[in-house]
Image (cartoon, rainbow, N blue to C red):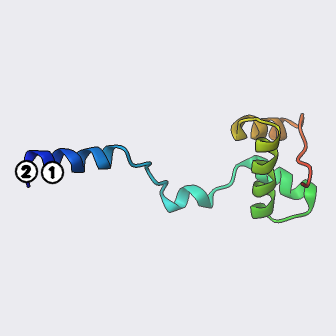
Amino acid sequence: MSIGTARIAHLRRATRIPRSPPHVHAHRPPAAHRAAAGLGTDMAEAFTLMRAQARRTNQQLADLSQAVVDGTTRISPA
């Protein structure tokens, strides 16, 4: 492998977006548990609703999650 080819391979690896390990997505935040209980839905649907509300209200998901856990915000169905 030439130096140029090695450099291109290095740049390609450096610009990739890292993937999360599978176990990261298996854990849902406590806010999703609370939202699921309040909406009478499953965890996946509650998390989807939280993401949609965060986008709709231009909030960070972490901030919305903290507000749900604190009880200052409720997740509304779309």
Residue at the outermost left position: 2
Q: Given the image, on which type of amino acid does mark 2 rest?
A: Ser
* Residue position marked by numbered label 1 in the rendering: 5
Residue 7 location (% of width, % of height): 18, 44
Q: How many marks?
A: 2
**Left or right: 12 as drawn, with respect to 55:** left
Q: Residue at x 81, y 40 (%)?
A: 69
Residue 12 lies left or right of residue 28; in this view the side is left
Per the model, the C-alpha gap separating discs 1 and 2 is: 5 Å
Q: Position of residue 76 (x, y in %)?
A: 92, 49
The structure residue drawn at horizontal position 22% and vertical position 47%, both measured from the top left corner, is 8
Amino acid type at circle 1 is Thr
**Quadrant that contains the N terminus:** bottom left
- The residue sitting at 77% across, 42% down in the picture is 54
Residue 75's x, y, as percent? Answer: 88, 47
For residue 2, the mark is 2
Please say if 63 is above or below 20: above
| Res 78 → quadrant | bottom right
**Is 14 in front, or is 41?**
14
Q: Position of residue 72 (x, y in %)?
A: 89, 34
Structural crowding at the residue carrying mark 1, measured as other residues with C-alpha within 10 Å and reported as few (<14), some (14–19) or many (≥20) = few
Q: Which mark is residue 24?
A: none
Q: Secondary structure at mark 2?
A: loop
Label 1 SS: helix
Q: Residue at x 82, y 35 (%)?
A: 67
Nearest the viewer among 57 and 24 is: 57
Quarter location, residue 46:
bottom right
- Do callouts 1 and 2 mark residues in contact (Cβ within 8 Å)? yes
